[in-house]
């Protein structure tokens, strides 16, 4: 376990899963400048476990908020101190999107504004049935400055994005699920169990292939079909040369249901 001022990080060597907890519960884990920096530092600390590993050690990450809330958005008390160039705090969102390992946002309670944008920058969103998700920036005379409208337009559609961002209304987890803004909804302890199982399932897959899929799916949101397909092809070819591909092919031929992938 590594403690940053506003984030706790843990790495489980056995399962290859990392965990980050946003830890400002008194402010509903609002994104202060410190918390944004700690979030990036926490991911870097998790990734540093690859340095001495035989292959790739970190293979999935779960991000959650302390004490029953994911995150109530940017820290409103810091707004007046920020200069216009600093206001959207893009850096941690991009860092999450470009992080080579899949990241699951485990969402309880409030997930609002920059908190929802953070969750949407992640690769998956698993929500508790009591979660409340929304983009309330409109009521502050702002828009979601870190891509909230763009993210929802892609996950759902532009009309849903307009509805969510123009009204600022909080969505229930079930409604967010219907709109494809979250991947799964669970009650109580089932959320912990399902998120853990899902993270471990991802972590048991060949890590280089998983990384290439994350990257290719991100590219798919930005380019046309033909360009995207040639990108996939370019990511596919080097994987043919990996030890993990050989291991997968061997396991298939030998009916071995427990192959060991190393990320090489
Ligand atoms: N920033 C700072 N503090 C917060 C925030 C926040 N976003 N949200 C809650 N808190 C604090 C409250 O001030 C309160 O602190 P204290 O106990 O010291 O008074 C504590 O957390 C608990 O909050 P409440 O008492 O309000 O709890 P309730 O259960 O009554 O209400 C709500 C919970 C509905 C979540 C309510 O707190 C709320 O509406 N919060 C604001 C949500 C919001 O508007 N988020 C969007 C912020 S804007 C954004 O994310 C992107 C803007 C990009 C520009 C960035 C510029 C720097």
Image (tube, rainbow, N blue to C red):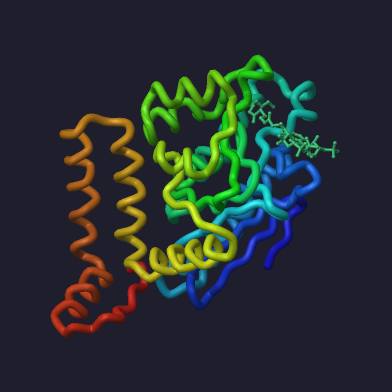
Q: Is residue 261 above or below residue 39?
A: below
The answer to whether residue 1 is visible is yes
Using the rendered view, name the quadrant where residue 139 is placed: top right
Report the residue at 48% width, 49% height from top. 125
Is 123 or 86 nearer to us in this picture? 123
Left or right, 34 with reference to 53? right
Is 145 or 155 nearer to us in this picture? 155
Name the quarter where the C terminus is drawn. bottom left
Left or right, 34 with reference to 165? right
Name the quarter where the N terminus is drawn. bottom right
Using the rendered view, name the quadrant where residue 256 is placed: bottom left
Q: Which residue occupies the extreme top position in the image?
A: 141
Q: Is residue 108 above or below residue 45?
A: above
Left or right, 82 with reference to 212? right
- Could you tell me residue 35's position as x and y percent? 70, 44
Report the residue at 58% width, 65% height from top. 189
- Could you tell me residue 205's position as x and y percent? 34, 67
Q: Is residue 79 above or below residue 200?
A: above
Q: Is residue 105 above or below residue 218?
A: below
The answer to whether residue 48 is visible is no
- Could you tell me residue 250's position as x and y percent? 18, 79
Q: Which residue occupies the extreme left position in the image?
A: 253
**Which quadrant contains ligand 1?**
top right
- Could you tell me residue 231's position as x and y percent? 22, 42
Report the residue at 59% width, 61% height from top. 188
Report the residue at 33% width, 61% height from top. 208
Left or right, 45 with reference to 148? right
Total labels drawn: 0
């Amino acid at each position: 376990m590594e403690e940053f001022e506003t984030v706790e990080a843990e790495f489980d060597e056995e399962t290859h899963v990392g965990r980050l907890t946003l830890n400002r519960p008194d402010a509903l884990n609002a994104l202060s400048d410190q918390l944004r920096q700690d979030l990036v530092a926490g991911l870097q600390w998790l990734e540093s476990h690859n340095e001495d590993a035989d292959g790739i050690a970190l293979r999935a990450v779960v991000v959650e908020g302390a004490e029953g809330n994911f995150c109530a958005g940017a820290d409103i008390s810091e707004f007046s101190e920020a200069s216009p160039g600093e206001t959207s705090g893009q850096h941690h969102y991009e860092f999450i999107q470009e992080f080579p390992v899949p990241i699951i946002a485990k969402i309880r309670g409030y997930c609002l504004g920059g908190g929802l944008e953070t969750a949407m920058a992640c690769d998956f969103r698993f929500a508790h049935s009591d979660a409340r998700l929304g983009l309330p920036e409109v009521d502050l005379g702002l828009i979601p400055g870190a891509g909230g409208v763009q993210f929802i337009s892609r996950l759902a559609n532009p009309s849903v994005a307009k509805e969510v961002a123009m009204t600022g209304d909080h969505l229930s987890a079930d409604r967010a699920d219907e709109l494809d803004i979250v991947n799964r909804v669970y009650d109580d302890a089932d959320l912990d169990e399902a998120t853990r199982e899902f993270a471990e399932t991802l972590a048991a897959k060949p890590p280089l292939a998983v990384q290439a899929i994350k990257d290719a799916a991100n590219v798919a949101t930005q380019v046309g079909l033909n360009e995207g397909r040639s990108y996939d092809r370019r990511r596919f070819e080097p994987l043919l040369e990996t030890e993990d591909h050989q291991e997968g092919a061997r396991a298939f031929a030998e009916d071995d249901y427990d192959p060991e992938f190393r990320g090489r």
